Image (cartoon, rainbow, N blue to C red):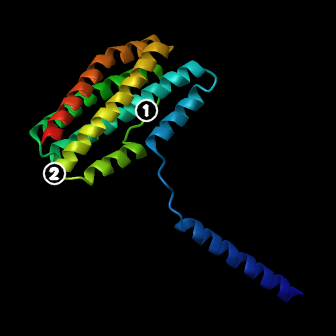
Amino acid sequence: MKKILLAGKTFLAAGLIILSLNSCKKETKQEDPKEVAEDANEQKFDTINDKEDDSEFLVDQAEINLSEIELGKLAQQKGTNPEVKKYGKMLVDEHTKAASEVSALAKAKNFTLPTSVTEDGKEEYNKLNEKSGADFDKKFADMMIDGHEKAIDKLKKAADKATDQDVKLWASNNIPGLTAHLEHAKMLKQTLDKK
C-alpha cells in the first residue's frame, strides 16, 4: 500500500514538473496597442457610453497618425518618384502634429491611446514594404487614397456625433487638412498612372 501511495505521489510530482515546464515554454503574445487602449478606456468609462464613443474616436485617430507617420517614413526611403518622397515627408510632418494634438486632447479627457503602431498598421506597412520601384509608388498612392477616405469618414462622424465639444471641434477642424491630403494623393496616383 505504501508503495502504491509513493508511486502515486512520484507520478503526481512528475506531472506537475512537466506542466510547469510546458507553461514556461509558451511565450506571451504581446497585445495590440489599440486593444490595450480601448480596454483601458472601456474600464474607465463603462457607465458613460458617450465618453466611450469619444475615446474610441481618439484611439482611431492615434492609430491612423502612428500608421501614417511610419508609411510616410517608408515612402521617403523607398519611393522612386520625387513626388512620392515629398508626399511621405508631408505625411510625417502633418501626422506628427496631429498626433501631438490628439495626445493632448486625450490627456485632458483622461483617455488612453495606443503608443505604438497597431497590428493592422504593421500589416499595412509590411504589404507596402514588400513592393519596390514603380510598384511601391503606385501601392503607396492607392493606400493613401483609401486610408484618407476612411479617416475623413471617421472625422465627419465625430464632428457630427461626438458628445464632447472639444472632440467635436478637433474633428471638424481636421477635415479640411485630410481632404487636402486625399486630393494630393489622387493627383499623385494620376501622375504615377501616366508613367
Give the alpha-carbon distance from disc 1 to disc 2, as whole Å.
Answer: 35 Å
Task: From the viewer's perspective, tell me whether residue 191 is left or right of residue 32.
Answer: left
Residue drawn 38% across and 30% down? 150
Q: Amino acid at mark 2?
A: Gly
Q: Position of residue 86 (x, y in %)?
A: 13, 35
Q: Which residue is disc 1 drawn over?
A: 113
Please determine whether, in this image, residue 189 is positioned above or below residue 176.
below
Residue drawn 53% across and 30% down? 41
- The one of 8 and 82 positioned closer to us in this rendering: 82
- The one of 82 and 25 positioned closer to us in this rendering: 82
Q: Which residue is disc 2 drawn over?
A: 133
Residue drawn 55% across and 66% down? 24
Please determine whether, in this image, residue 94 is positioned above or below residue 170.
below
Q: Nearer the viewer, mark 1 or mark 2?
A: 2
Q: Position of residue 44 (x, y in %)?
A: 57, 28
Where, quadrant-wise, is the N terminus in this rendering? bottom right
Whether residue 111 is visible to the viewer of this picture, yes or no, is no
Please determine whether, in this image, residue 24 is positioned above or below residue 144.
below
Q: Quadrant of residue 159?
A: top left
Please tell me the numbered disc located at residue 88: none
